Image: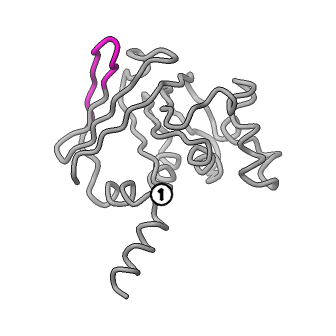
Amino acid sequence: MAERIIKGRVIKLGDYVNTDVIAPGRWHREGLDVLRLHTMEAIRPNFYKELQAGDIIVAGKNFGCGSHRESATAIMKVLGISAIVADSVARLYYRNGIAFGIPIFGINRISQIFEEGDEMEIVMGPESVWVRNVGSGAKLSAPPIPDTMAQIMEAGGVYELLKKRIAERA
């Protein structure tokens, strides 16, 4: 994997943000365009209005816990979130994030070095991943992303990677 850098403004959330908070169930049948208006509304009314394209979510423990709800991950792409970094990420949410091509990381203590509005820089390389608070200089690292997952993220998700591979073989 070639080195990839992501920079963005931090949107900070707390611990145990579950999939029903991320994507409230009563709005699922309305589609992602309507669901985006209600994302996180239980903890941050008008969340969608606060966002700028390229923002990065920083959260505490067990981000994305709860039900296996793909729309709770898909909506992040619709909202323009460029990455999600939390102290820990629920296993299914993590896998869905990769499948949708969203860089998503669990890095212990990450929520302690960022505040709302800080600028984050993520460097994903073949040997490691590191995250830096641009303002304070605080930095944490994580193991590298496995090659298969990195290819999925670089392609923009599983479907995009499959389309690319099919086109290459045609």
Q: Quadrant of the C terminus?
A: bottom left
Horizontally, residue 134 falls left or right of residue 76, namely left
Where does the image place residue 46, in percent across and percent down from the top left?
A: 74, 27
The residue depicted at 30 percent of the width and 24 percent of the height is 132
Picture coordinates of residue 167 (x, y %)? 40, 80
Whether 15 is drawn above or below 71: the answer is above
Q: Which residue is at the far bottom? A: 170
| Label 1 packing within 10 angstroms: few (<14), some (14-19), many (20+) | many
Q: Is residue 93 above or below residue 116?
A: below
Identify the element where label 1 is drawn: helix
Residue 112 position in % (x across, y down): 41, 15
Membership of 141 in magenta stretch: yes
Quick one: 11 or 61, which is closer to the camera? 11
Q: Label 1 amino acid?
A: Ala
**Residue 20 % position (x, y):** 70, 39
In this picture, which residue range is highlighted in magenta? Answer: 132-142
Above or below 94: residue 107:
above
Q: Is residue 28 magenta?
A: no
Q: What residue would you read off at disc 1?
A: 99
Going 70% across and 24% down the picture, which residue do you hit?
A: 43
Q: Nearer the viewer, residue 119 or 61?
A: 119
